[in-house]
Image (tube, grey):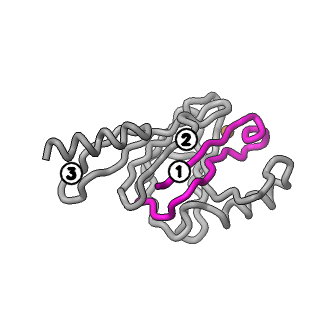
Amino acid sequence: MRVVLISVITVLVAVGFRAQEGAGAAGARQVVELQMKEFAFVPATVTFRAGVPVEQRLVNRGAVEHEFMVYDPGHMHLAGMDPDVMHRELEARSYFRGMDVRVEGKAKMVERMGKDLVMITLAPGERVVLRFTPKKKGTFEVGCHIPGHYEAGMKGRWVVR
Ligand SMILES: [Cu+2]
């Protein structure tokens, strides 16, 4: 059992995460902290294993508010796009569509479309925990679309293997 656990931890640490053994029969879970600041997501790439429950901590360590959205950017050119058009596009392309995402903690805003998580806005110092199990595999984008932030480099990669 110890050898198996160490192997799991080694794999998850290798892709940039701390892993903790879940309580009870649930088994492994992926614990990730994603920080937001001016103007970046840290780390710039987060990688998940599909099918393994995630505990994602999202923290705003900046001095201004920031948004967290995850979506399939496709071939869209987001820079310069009309903000309302872009927001609707990103809602439709949200990674979390059709998923059950729990958000715990105080956030300035948690936006859902129906039951689907679309966006989380955090004021400086706020932190939340998201719990979900990723299913769709691929490479997606994390972005903050408060005017000027994305253009200043506030985006990251969200990889599910
Ligand atoms: Cu931002």
Residue sitting at x 54%, y 62%: 96
84 and 107: which is toward the camera? 84
Residue sitting at x 60%, y 29%: 62
Disc 2 marks a residue whose amino acid type is: Thr
Q: Do the residues labelled 1 and 3 touch (CB within 8 Å)?
A: no
110 and 33: which is toward the camera? 33
Q: Do the residues labelled 3 and 2 touch (CB within 8 Å)?
A: no
Q: Indicate yes or no whether the magenta region holds residue 147.
A: yes
Question: Separation of disc 1 and disc 2 at Cα?
Answer: 7 Å
Q: In which quarter of the image is ligand 1?
A: top right
Going by the image, does 100 lie left or right of 152? Answer: left
> Is disc 2 placed on a helix, strand or loop?
strand
Residue 121: percent from the left, percent from the top?
60, 47
Disc 3 marks a residue whose amino acid type is: Ala
78 and 38: which is toward the camera? 78
Which label was assigned to residue 159? Answer: 1
Which label was assigned to residue 92? Answer: none
**Residue at mark 1: C-beta within 8 A of ligand 1:** no
Residue sitting at x 58%, y 33%: 124
Report which residue position mark 2 lands on: 45
Residue 119: percent from the left, percent from the top?
60, 54
Question: Separation of disc 1 and disc 3 at Cα?
Answer: 25 Å
Residue sitting at x 79%, y 51%: 78
Callout 2 crowding tier (Cα within 10 Å): few <14, some 14–19, many ≥20: some
Q: Indicate yes or no whether the magenta region holds residue 43.
A: no
Report which residue position mark 3 lands on: 23
Disc 1 marks a residue whose amino acid type is: Val
Residue 20: percent from the left, percent from the top?
28, 43
